[in-house]
Amino acid sequence: MKVENAVTPEREQVMEFIGGEGRIAMVNLLKFKEKAEYPDGRDADLSGEEAYARYAEAMNKLLKANGGGITFMGRVNNLLLGEVGELWDVVAIAEYSSPQSLITIASSPEFQAIEVHRLAGLAGQLNITTTPGEEAVFG
């Protein structure tokens, strides 16, 4: 299995994603830069995680305003099963009312204003889209 972190999805990935319907939960495996890297050089004393925290707080407000929210966020401690070259720093789960709501949020001026913090803090991430509900395993 190849594992490759990224910061921004490819166009094809977005097009496949928006074809879905219904509520989704996005599992985010986050890896932070040691130091925040803002294009204008501001806040050079911040860690990548601190820069990302600015984004996460504002993003949660956007999610809630659109029928979703961050439902879980936790630090990665170790790996019990499997193998990866390097662990992620944090796992976060964000719920969206639909794939289209994610597109709406990502296209909004509010998101554009906060994305600078996400880009300044993230070294890379994996986003895994899921459909909430027990029926997937227990149905």
Image (spheres, grey):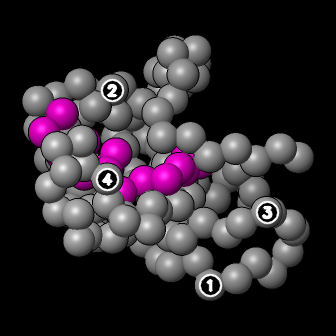
Q: Out of 28 and 94, give the one closest to the viewer.
A: 28
Mark found first going from the N terminus, 1 or 2 = 1
The Cα–Cα distance between marks 3 and 1, rounded to whole angstroms, is 15 Å
Task: Give residue 99's position: percent from left, percent from top.
Answer: 42, 30
> Which of the two marks, 4 or 3, is nearer to us in this view?
4
Q: Which mark is residue 85?
A: 3
Q: CA distance from mark 3 to mark 2?
A: 31 Å
How far separated are the C-alphas under marks 4 and 2?
Answer: 25 Å
Q: Who comes first in sequence, dot 4 or dot 2? A: 4
Residues at circles 1 and 4 in contact by the CB criterion of under 8 Å: no
Q: Which residues are magenta?
A: 112-127
- Report x, y in % for residue 53: 27, 66
Query: Quick one: label 1, few (<14), some, or many (20+) residues within 10 Å?
Result: few
| Residue 63 % position (x, y) | 24, 48
- Label 4 crowd (10 A; few <14 / some 14-19 / many >=20): many
Q: Amino acid at mark 3?
A: Gly
User: Would residue 115 be found to the left or right of residue 35 on screen?
Assistant: left
Q: Which secondary structure lies at badge 2?
A: helix
Q: Which mark is residue 37?
A: 4
